[in-house]
Image (cartoon, grey):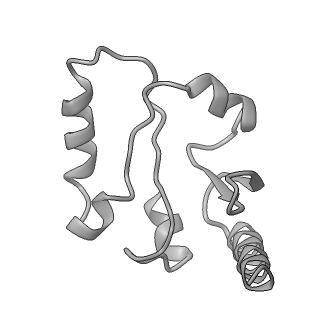
Amino acid sequence: MDQWVTALALHDNDAWLEAPIVGDVSSMIRPMIRTGMRTRYDAGERSHVTPVFEGADTIRHIVPQPSGDVVVLILDRSGNVTTAIDGTATAANISRARASMREQQSEVHRSF
């Protein structure tokens, strides 16, 4: 995921979220997992990281059988997935993500 954050030049004040899918684990160890994941990030980035413990099946339904470790989802303002990119931050994938992000920004500007 870090390569995507860097490649897309995402900043602390941008609207992005890193959500590693952990799956259903005991509620007693969830805080330890959250803390462990967030400690590797700068203070500003920590608010963008939240592990997914419940709802993994729903996410897997949205992005069936990913081939890579990372799936980038770009959403509209209503939370609908407009683009799903599976895999690493290759030039083609970055270009596709940026185009989708520009499209979403254009939609926001047109609605005002």
Q: Is residue 4 left or right of residue 82?
A: left
Residue nearer the viewer, 105 or 10: 105
Q: Position of residue 85 (x, y in %)?
A: 72, 55
Q: What quarter of the picture does the C terminus occupy? A: bottom right
Q: Position of residue 64 (x, y in %)?
A: 75, 32
Q: Which residue does the image show at 53% across and 66% down from the upper left?
A: 4
Rendered position, 93 above or below 95: above
Q: Residue furthest top?
A: 26
Quadrant of res 90? bottom right
Quadrant of res 107? bottom right
Q: Which residue does the image show at 32% across and 58% down from the upper left?
A: 47
Q: Is residue 51 left or right of residue 112?
A: left
Q: Which residue does the image show at 56% across and 76% down from the upper left?
A: 8
Rendered position, 34 above or below 38: above
Q: Which residue does the image show at 46% across and 23% down from the upper left?
A: 23
Q: Is residue 21 left or right of residue 110?
A: left
Q: Position of residue 91 (x, y in %)?
A: 70, 74
Rendered position, 8 above or below 43: below
Quadrant of res 83? bottom right
Q: Position of residue 100 (x, y in %)?
A: 76, 71
Number of on-image labels: 0
